[in-house]
Image (cartoon, rainbow, N blue to C red):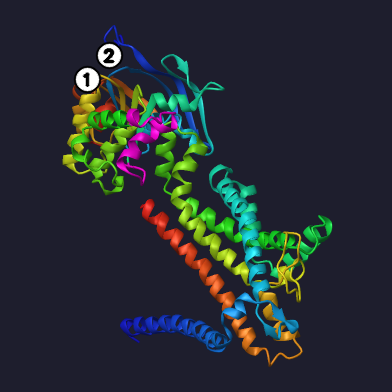
């Protein structure tokens, strides 16, 4: 059978990886992953716990660097640039590649200071300018109307769903091109989850979004492309519609039909 | 014996132990206040001693102890906090750092007279600082460093990893992350632990005995190279070396009371700072 590319001919691949192997100490977590992730689309990573999808996600902004004893082999490029070459600027990379974590983690500071944190460390100190960035980011993350009257109050006073949207606003404020989301809704109630999903839908045309999720319905609802990981291997990567209707691999089918995982 | 019964007995035992400790401490405090208060007045804390401490006040000893404390804080706090930051944030967690930690904890248990001898050897003699505030402060600083490092490292580690991750993921450097999102949240714990350690140093006699303390010196120091009197040493002299130990008993108690109040003041300062930072960074 001839492999046909799932991507339209004019697709621009923002993240490309080639033969990526990843190790935690002596334990290999990822095996030979070669994958091209399209720009300005939503790509979902699915798979059972421990399959390596979060590890793979954290490769794109080099967050795995913060874990002692990890090692990466292979080639990871963002916009054609090898992000793991010697002398690569991690700070610049992380400005371009924002991240939202599974557990919402707003700083114990005011809502304003949370969103302004990124711009400030990158050198924006003009009050007017900061206020504009904060407002714009909060509007983009669909939180502005709820918090505009209490920007100076502590962010930890927000509800779980609001906190997560604040974390998205905080990531957007830096002006990234890529947004990595590591199970951003897994700790939220259904209503807040829907709001996050709607938000992802609104951001999809401006940002390259890669989202790790445990929830297959969520992947089906919000993503254009879906990658299925199993035990450190990329089993199948295709248009979401294909993955959920006509998976090529038996393992994928078993997983999405709930036979394991 | 029923489980309920044994539960009750355990409860009473534990409560009893707690109360007996409170009782002992309370009695010591009560005794000091009862005997010290009558001799404590403005003249006592504002005047120079006369007749080898049989009469007059203890101003030089108060000033001496305060300057030693100031010196200790200036030296030990930055050193201790920096070491703790290195150990908690930068150092690889391997056998070598585990050994360093073990060494630090062991140092915390070294008898204070050993620090005194160390200070005498290094600061007074080898570095030629003489018996001086400088030597004494440095010696006390060495003694409290382990406490400061251990409690600061604990406070730093208590900051959830999520704050560090979020900050790094936004493109902050490691130091920016520590400065803006780790240190501020752990400061209340660092300050509390450090002040408690320094408060203990205020009452130490052995380390200053060999490095700074003067037996009887009824004047104030002019520089950090001067000798000074100090409250704990003065207390020791009055209690054991004074020819008329019985006659100066009220003065001993009053000196002890002043020392206690000083340490209490330090702790109170720590509590205020703690409340301030807790309010500012609630997590």
Q: Do labels 1 and 2 share a chain?
A: yes
Q: Position of residue B205 (x, y in %)?
A: 69, 73
> Is B243 colored magenta in this rendering?
no
B26 to A62, vertically: above or below:
below
Q: Where is residue A135 in the image (x, y as percent from the top left)?
A: 26, 31
| Chain under numbered label 1 | A
Of label 1 and label 2, which has the lower sequence position?
2
| Chain under numbered label 2 | A
Residue that label 2 marks: A6
Q: Where is residue B26 in the image (x, y as percent from the top left)?
A: 49, 83
Q: Where is residue A109 in the image (x, y as percent from the top left)?
A: 35, 45
Image marks 1 and 2: residues in contact by CB distance under 8 Å: yes
Q: Which of B131 and A171 is in front in this view?
A: B131
A89 to B131, vertically: above or below:
above
Magenta span covers which residues? A103-130
Residue that label 1 marks: A242
């Amino acid at each position: 059978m001839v492999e046909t590319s799932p991507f339209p001919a004019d697709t621009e691949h923002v993240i490309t990886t080639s033969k990526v192997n990843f190790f935690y100490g002596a334990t290999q977590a990822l095996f030979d992953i070669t994958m091209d992730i399209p720009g300005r689309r939503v790509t979902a990573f699915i798979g059972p716990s421990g399959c390596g999808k979060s590890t793979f996600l954290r490769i794109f902004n080099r967050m795995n660097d913060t874990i002692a004893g990890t090692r990466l082999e292979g080639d990871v490029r963002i916009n054609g640039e090898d992000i793991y070459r010697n002398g690569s600027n991690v700070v610049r990379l992380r400005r371009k590649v924002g991240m939202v974590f599974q557990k919402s983690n707003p700083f114990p500071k005011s809502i304003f200071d949370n969103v302004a944190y990124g711009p400030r460390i990158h050198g924006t100190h003009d009050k007017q300018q900061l206020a504009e960035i904060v407002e714009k980011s909060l509007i983009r993350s669909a939180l502005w109307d709820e918090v505009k009257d209490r920007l100076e109050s502590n962010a930890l006073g927000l509800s779980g769903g609001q906190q997560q949207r604040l974390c998205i606003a905080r990531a957007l404020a830096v002006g990234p091109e890529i947004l990595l989301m590591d199970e951003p809704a897994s700790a939220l109630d259904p209503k807040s989850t829907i709001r996050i999903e709607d938000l992802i839908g609104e951001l999809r045309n401006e940002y390259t979004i890669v989202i790790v999720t445990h929830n297959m319905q969520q992947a089906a609802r919000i993503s254009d492309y879906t990658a299925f990981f199993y035990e450190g291997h990329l089993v199948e990567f295709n248009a979401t519609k294909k993955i959920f209707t006509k998976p090529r691999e038996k393992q994928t089918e078993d997983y999405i039909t709930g036979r394991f995982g | 014996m029923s489980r309920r019964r044994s539960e009750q007995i355990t409860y009473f035992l534990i409560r009893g132990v707690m109360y007996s400790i409170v009782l002992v401490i309370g009695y010591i405090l009560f005794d000091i206040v009862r005997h010290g208060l009558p001799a404590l007045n403005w003249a006592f804390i504002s005047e120079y001693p006369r007749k080898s401490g049989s009469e007059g006040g203890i101003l030089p000893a108060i000033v001496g102890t305060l300057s030693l404390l100031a010196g200790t804080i200036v030296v030990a706090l930055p050193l201790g906090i920096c070491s703790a930051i290195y150990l908690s944030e930068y150092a690889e967690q391997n056998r070598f750092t585990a050994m360093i930690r073990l060494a630090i904890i062991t140092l915390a248990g070294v008898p204070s007279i050993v620090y005194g001898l160390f200070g005498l050897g290094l600061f007074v003699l080898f570095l030629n600082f003489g018996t001086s505030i400088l030597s004494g402060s440095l010696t006390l600083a060495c003694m409290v460093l382990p406490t400061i490092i251990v409690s600061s490292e604990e406070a730093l580690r208590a900051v959830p990893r999520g704050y560090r991750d979020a900050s790094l993921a936004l493109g902050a450097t490691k130091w920016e992350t520590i400065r803006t999102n780790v240190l501020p949240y752990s400061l209340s714990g660092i300050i509390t632990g450090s002040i408690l350690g320094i408060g203990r140093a205020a009452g130490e006699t052995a380390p200053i005995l060999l490095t700074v303390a003067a037996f009887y010196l009824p004047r104030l120091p002019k520089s950090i190279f001067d000798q000074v009197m100090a409250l704990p040493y003065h207390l020791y002299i009055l209690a054991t070396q004074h020819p008329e130990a019985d006659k100066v008993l009220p003065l001993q108690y009053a000196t002890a009371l002043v020392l206690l109040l000083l340490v209490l003041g330090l702790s109170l300062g720590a509590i205020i700072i703690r409340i301030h930072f807790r309010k500012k960074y609630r997590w």
